[in-house]
Amino acid sequence: MDSHEATLQGTAPPPDLADLAAPMLRAYLAERDEPCPACRYNLRGLLSDHCPECNQALRLRVGLVEPRLGWFLAAVIGASAGLGLNLLLLIYFVIVTAMRRGGPPGYFLLHNLVGSIIHGACVFLLLRYGPRIRRAPLPSRVLLTAAMWGLCAVNIVLFSLFIR
């Protein structure tokens, strides 16, 4: 039923949520010190639904008290562990090469460069898509975490095979 039909039947149309959002936002910020999510400007006493400092549109939202970070952080730590291992070994390669004028074999360098690139890309993508990952279903987050730690384990196994 549209608003014209509702008026003909004598009932008021339901209020549009967009019409309620701006007054609710202003009421919420009337007595609260809340920063703008974009520029951190204090929005206390806001008179519109845009930040007066950066002119970004604002909305009132419901958020989780505790965001789902556990599995996400475990995945980031797994990818970061592999990245850290490869970067430390690259630093070792540079030091040994500088001191002895010749360092470990070329596959040592190649393995750690490739590992750094792969793990670095994983860390970047995890951080870039973190909010989407945290909203994913639990089995997907567990699988992603297992994949990051599995990648780290494969990296260590391959390194230990090459080091012999």
Image: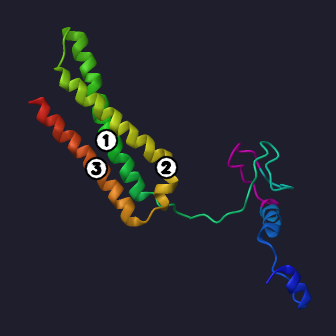
**Which mark, by number, is residue 81?**
1
Residues at marks 3 and 1 touching, judged by CB atoms closer than 8 Å: yes
Residues at marks 2 and 3 touching, judged by CB atoms closer than 8 Å: no
Q: Position of residue 91 (x, y in %)?
A: 29, 23
Neighbours of disc 1 within 10 Å: few (<14), some (14-19), many (20+): some
Identify the mark nearer the N-term, 1 or 2.
1
Q: Position of residue 25 (x, y in %)?
A: 78, 62
- The answer, for residue 86, to whether it is visible in the render is yes
Q: Measure how far apart labels 3 and 1 are at the Cα level.
A: 8 Å
Identify the mark nearer the N-term, 2 or 3.
2
**Which mark, by number, is residue 62?**
none
Residue at figure coordinates x 43%, y 66% from the top left: 137
- Secondary structure at numbered mark 3: helix
Inspect the magenta stretch and tell me whether residue 38 lies in it: yes
Q: Measure how far apart labels 2 and 3 are at the Cα level.
A: 18 Å
Residue 36, compared with residue 160, is above or below; it is below
Q: Position of residue 89 (x, y in %)?
A: 25, 28
**Which mark, by number, is residue 149?**
3
Inspect the magenta stretch and tell me whether residue 156 lies in it: no
Mark 2 vs mark 3: in front: 2
| Amino acid type for the residue under numbered disc 1 | Ala
Magenta residues, start to end: 29-42
- Secondary structure at numbered mark 2: loop
Neighbours of disc 2 within 10 Å: few (<14), some (14-19), many (20+): few
**Residue at label 2?**
129
The reply, left or right, for residue 60 in relation to residue 99 is right
